[in-house]
């Protein structure tokens, strides 16, 4: 089959590779019909997430058709149109039983990396480096899904392919970001990052009762989408001081809930010195991640408010304003998405037309053009929100 | 899972620090492993400065300690712990059937049952070196505990204990595996390193992880045999597109 392989920093190629086969009794093989790029793939491509190996197939957000299944797969049939949650649960461990699928004890076949770096290992993720299991990704014609009964979900008739594909990752990640914010009616929610996940977080915040949602970005098309599609007010951090603007908009209180949908490669916007400091340290590998958004959220959040973090961080950060966080009694919630917990609810929202993620899809390209698709996504050219590949 | 370590008693205090440093260094090493740009010399230099500066701890002493275990002449005790979401009875029954243990230790070739309490074990070290020992059960407490020791003439003399106790909050069962090797410096010690390489604690941890995965999900998750663009896996690397950003 053809697959998009990572061969080194910013070196992506579509190559011929063997077809995947059933390796475990609970596996299924999915024929991929749509597979989306994701912001966190840019961290991999740029070399910020370690333990990538040349030849790894990337991609983790996809929709397809079940073409083969292992003997112990009972809930799926050949021909089913399914999405697969990008983060793999075994379905049986204590964490999976408590719907904390991204903390699965068993789905990562290479736990030693994470145990050394993080103390414990977390769930495997498709196409997401060897620290996260080394599973082959979805930018391919076929993909093998382990523990298919837990991780694959049949797409209801009334939901289109273009809506469903994002229920694999962007929608549940954004929804969980809002869910972790423990939003109460009347709350003001600020979302850093107006890409796919940020858009879904804004929309979800309204579904959970937020009175006002403020989206923060610098790309005009994303800010426009946040206004027109997600119903948010917007701030362009390249033009205004975010602290001043947020306090002005909230009567000096600050937002009740601050959501980080950016992660490790954040721009600092106004503070050029901080940005230089972070970029310098990251380039020298003195610091894995640039925590600009985290610092800003801690500063801006109202006293006693909640920070919800779904932007991906990989390693160590410094200059973390712990004094502000502690004295302001902030609550931190964070994590990779537990998508399996939300999929059913999300399909219902889509069927009721509460939520339509299909507008994230701005470009649909052939898999053969995937390297250019990623370049476009990275440069955010042509108002690109998400490129989706159809093999 | 917690890590086992050499000479458990003695290292209690310093081991915490050592492990923290191992984690920090490990994390940074991961970062370096992924770095395929920038200056390597600068990165290495800066990394050391950062680590030393960050906590005000001199690097030399943890590093000296890390080099110590290889030279020690003390009994070596390894412990590993895991919580398995399965009742103790089920785990006890599984372990009591020693034939099941071959699946937990990949270097085990055969387990032969000689009597109700004695068994004969055949394993191989790196390079296929055969290692053989007879083992006798000491104490068996239903659903709680199994202890054993090896008999005279064993290539790998050791004592072992596996302990099952209910985990709080209905989390299943906490399993502890303890292995003590006597004497580590002698013939047995050579067998230990032949069999386990330099990290017996890693082997113990891996064994409990396999037990957990077999008992909880009924299979060992794997990526062996999946496709990739690596030539050694059969990818033909017919280059269709290339881009450099
Ligand atoms: Zn993603
Ligand atoms: Zn699990």
Image (cartoon, rainbow, N blue to C red):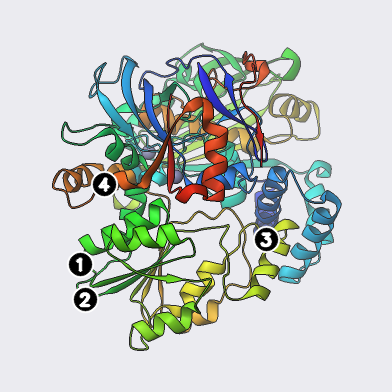
Residue under label 4: A342
Q: From the viewer's perspective, is residue A139 above or below residue A178?
A: above
Residue A186: mark in rendering: 2
Residue A209: mark in rendering: 1
Ligand 2: image quarter: top left
Q: Are marks 2 and 4 in contact (CB under 8 Å)?
A: no
* Left or right: residue B79 compared with residue A100: right
Q: Residues within 10 Å of mark 3 (few under 14, many from 20)?
A: many
**Which secondary structure, mark 3?**
loop
Looking at the rendered image, the disc whose residue lies closer to the viewer, 2 or 4, is 2
Q: Residues within 10 Å of mark 1 (few under 14, many from 20)?
A: some
Q: Earlier in the sequence, mark 1 or mark 2?
A: 2
The image position of residue A157, as x and y in percent, is: 16, 31
Query: Residue at 82% of width from left, 49% of height from top?
Result: B40
Query: Residue at 37% of width from left, 22% of height from top?
Result: A30
Q: Could you tell me which chain the residue with mark 3 belongs to? A: A
Q: Could you tell me which chain the residue with mark 4 belongs to? A: A
Q: Earlier in the sequence, mark 3 or mark 1?
A: 1
The image position of residue B82, as x and y in percent, is: 47, 42
Quadrant where the C terminus of chain A is found in the figure: top left
Disc 3 from disc 4: Cα separation: 34 Å
Q: Earlier in the sequence, mark 1 or mark 4?
A: 1
Residue under label 3: A287
On whether disc 1 and disc 2 are found on a single subunit, the reply is: yes
Let me know if residue B132 appears in the view: no
Disc 2 from disc 4: Cα separation: 24 Å
Q: Are marks 1 and 2 in contact (CB under 8 Å)?
A: yes
On whether disc 2 and disc 4 are found on a single subunit, the reply is: yes
């Amino acid at each position: 089959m053809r697959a998009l392989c990572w061969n080194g920093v910013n070196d992506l190629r579509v190559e011929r590779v063997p077809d995947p086969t059933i390796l475990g009794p609970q596996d299924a093989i999915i024929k991929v019909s749509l597979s989306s790029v994701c912001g966190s793939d840019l961290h991999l491509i740029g070399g910020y997430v370690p333990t990538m190996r040349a030849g790894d197939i990337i991609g983790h957000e996809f929709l397809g058709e079940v073409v083969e299944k292992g003997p112990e797969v009972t809930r799926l049939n050949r021909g089913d149109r399914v999405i697969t949650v990008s983060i793999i649960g075994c379905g049986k461990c204590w964490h999976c039983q408590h719907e904390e699928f991204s903390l699965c004890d068993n789905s990562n076949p290479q736990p030693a990396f994470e145990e050394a770096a993080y103390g414990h290992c977390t769930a495997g993720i498709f196409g997401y480096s060897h620290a996260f299991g080394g599973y082959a990704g979805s930018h391919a014609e076929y993909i093998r899904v382990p523990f298919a009964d837990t991780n694959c979900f049949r797409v209801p008739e009334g939901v289109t392919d273009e809506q469903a594909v994002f229920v694999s990752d962007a929608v549940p990640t954004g929804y969980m970001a809002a869910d972790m914010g423990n939003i109460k009616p009347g709350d003001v929610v600020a979302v850093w990052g107006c890409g796919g996940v940020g858009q879904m977080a804004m929309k979800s915040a309204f579904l959970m009762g937020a009175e006002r949602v403020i989206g923060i970005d610098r790309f005009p098309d994303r800010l426009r989408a946040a206004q027109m599609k997600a119903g948010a007010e917007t701030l362009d951090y390249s033009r205004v001081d975010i602290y001043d603007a947020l306090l002005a908009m909230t009567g000096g209180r600050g937002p009740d809930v601050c959501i980080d949908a950016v992660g490790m490669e954040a721009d600092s916007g106004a503070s050029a010195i901080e940005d230089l400091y972070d970029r310098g340290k990251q380039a020298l590998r003195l610091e894995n991640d640039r925590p600009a958004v985290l610092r800003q959220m801690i500063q801006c959040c109202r006293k006693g408010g909640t920070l919800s973090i779904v932007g991906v961080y990989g390693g160590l950060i410094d200059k973390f304003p712990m004094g502000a966080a502690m004295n302001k009694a902030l609550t931190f919630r964070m994590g990779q998405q537990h998508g399996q917990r939300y999929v059913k609810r999300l399909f219902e929202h889509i069927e009721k037309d509460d939520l339509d993620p299909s507008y994230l899809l701005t470009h649909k390209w052939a898999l053969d053009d995937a390297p250019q698709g990623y370049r476009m996504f990275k440069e955010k050219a042509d108002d690109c929100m998400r490129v989706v590949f159809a093999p | 899972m917690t890590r086992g370590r050499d000479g458990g008693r003695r290292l209690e205090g310093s081991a915490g620090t050592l492990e923290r440093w191992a984690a920090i260094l490990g994390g940074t090493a991961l970062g370096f492993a992924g770095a395929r740009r920038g200056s390597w010399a600068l990165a290495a230099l800066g990394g050391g400065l950062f680590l030393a500066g960050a906590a005000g701890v001199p690097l030399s002493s943890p590093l000296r300690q890390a080099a110590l275990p290889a030279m020690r002449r003390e009994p070596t005790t390894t412990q590993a712990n895991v919580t398995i979401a399965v009742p103790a009875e089920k785990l006890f029954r599984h372990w009591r059937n020693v034939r099941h243990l071959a699946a937990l230790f990949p270097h085990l070739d055969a387990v032969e049952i000689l009597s109700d309490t004695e068994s004969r074990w055949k394993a191989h070290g790196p390079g296929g070196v055969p290692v053989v020992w007879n083992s006798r059960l000491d104490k068996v407490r239903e659903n709680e505990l199994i202890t054993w020791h090896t008999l005279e003439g064993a290539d790998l003399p050791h004592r072992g204990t596996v302990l099952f106790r209910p985990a709080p909050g209905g989390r299943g069962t906490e399993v502890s595996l303890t292995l003590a090797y006597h004497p580590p410096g002698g013939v047995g010690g050579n067998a230990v390193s032949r069999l386990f390489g330099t990290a017996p604690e890693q082997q113990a941890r891996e064994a409990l992880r396999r037990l957990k995965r077999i008992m909880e999900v009924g299979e060992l998750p794997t990526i062996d045999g999946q496709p990739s663009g690596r030539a050694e896996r059969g990818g033909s690397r017919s280059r269709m597109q290339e881009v450099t950003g």
